[in-house]
Image (tube, rainbow, N blue to C red):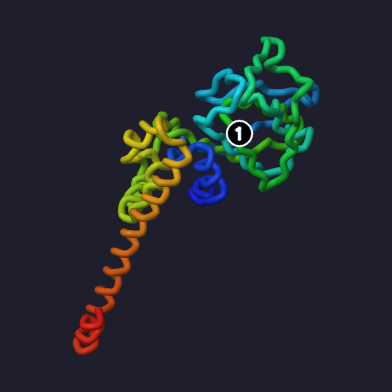
């Protein structure tokens, strides 16, 4: 899963709208079995995602973003994604009768294999009942702000190895993604006198420089190792050049 979760376009998009506070909340391969034909074109359930709420009549920075990566064509039988456009910045509410109903302003997203959809945590959306002859499948993962808790557990050996690699490489971005952000508190307490975006750019530059220092150190170590592996006369001449 790691190449998808760290895809530069997806992670870069999340950081552009959430700031350098992006951590992985959870990842899941979803599979819904087919239902009877009389359920065709029926929404599963309209909802806003976890930490979502009825928004004010304005845009707010997402506390989480859900990415849905589709593995098959989302035909009307398989069940396209349904969204209410602009509901992430409008105080749109639903009655009990509307939660499982088709709505006049809904838009159906008939995704193709390989398509990825990003969903703001306050956007009202729903799946559609699967009435095809096979399972409805997609890969979903959630980024949330690094001040929030994560749903998945990242304490297994593979995740610990990734954290160790990130620490060795001074990779603060990857540390944040895995819930190990050492700068979470000083950076979260910001934006009172400067625009958020100004601070975000400054922090990205800091993180890039921090990672570069590790790269310079690794390069120096490799040069020393190479020098020590050479014959004595050659290594002495190389050391003088350094």
For image coordinates 32% across by 68% down, the residue present is 219
For image coordinates 75% across by 38% down, the residue present is 110
The number of numbered discs placed on residues in the rendered structure image is: 1
* Residue found at the very far front of the displayed protein: 193
For image coordinates 65% across by 15% down, the residue present is 93
Left or right of residue 76, residue 219 in this image: left
- Vertical position of residue 89 compared to residue 174: above or below: above
Name the residue nearer the viewer: 54 or 59.
59
Residue 89 horizontal/vertical position (percent): 62, 25
- Vertical position of residue 94 compared to residue 152: above or below: above
Element on which disc 1 rests: strand
For image coordinates 40% across by 35% down, the residue present is 153
Left or right of residue 206, residue 240 in this image: left
* Residue found at the very far bottom of the displayed protein: 233
Q: Estimate how packed mark 1 is, as few (under 14), some (14 to 19) or many (20 or more) residues with alpha carbons within 10 Å.
A: many
Query: Which quadrant, please, contains the C terminus?
Result: bottom left
Disc 1 target residue: 119
Quadrant position of residue 213: bottom left
- Vertical position of residue 104 compared to residue 143: above or below: above
Residue 187 horizontal/vertical position (percent): 36, 37
Name the residue nearer the viewer: 201 or 156.
201
Residue 85 horizontal/vertical position (percent): 70, 28
Left or right of residue 51, residue 96 in this image: right
Residue 81 horizontal/vertical position (percent): 70, 32
Quadrant position of residue 181: top left
Left or right of residue 51, residue 164 in this image: left
- Vertical position of residue 112 compared to residue 192: above or below: below
């Amino acid at each position: 899963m790691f190449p998808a979760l760290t895809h530069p376009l997806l992670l870069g998009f999340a950081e552009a709208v959430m700031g350098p506070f992006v951590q992985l909340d959870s990842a899941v391969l979803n599979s819904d079995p087919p239902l009877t034909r009389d359920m065709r074109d029926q929404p599963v359930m309209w909802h806003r995602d976890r930490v979502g709420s009825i928004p004010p009549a304005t845009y707010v920075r997402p506390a989480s973003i859900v990415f849905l990566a589709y593995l098959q064509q989302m035909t009307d039988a398989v069940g396209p994604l349904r969204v209410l456009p602009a509901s992430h910045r409008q105080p749109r509410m639903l009655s009990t009768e509307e939660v499982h109903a088709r709505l006049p302003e809904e838009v159906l997203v008939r995704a193709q294999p390989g398509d990825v959809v990003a969903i703001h945590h306050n956007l009202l959306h729903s799946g559609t009942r699967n009435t095809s002859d096979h399972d409805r499948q997609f890969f979903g993962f959630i980024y949330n702000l690094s001040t929030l808790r994560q749903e998945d557990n990242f304490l297994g050996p593979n995740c610990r190895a990734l954290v160790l690699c990130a620490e060795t490489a001074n990779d603060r971005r990857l540390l944040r993604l895995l819930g190990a952000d050492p700068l979470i508190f000083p950076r979260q307490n910001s934006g009172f006198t400067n625009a958020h975006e100004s601070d975000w750019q400054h922090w990205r530059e800091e993180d890039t420089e921090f990672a570069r220092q590790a790269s310079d150190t690794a390069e120096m170590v490799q040069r020393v190792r190479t020098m020590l592996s050479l014959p004595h006369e050659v290594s002495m001449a190389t050391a003088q050049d350094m």
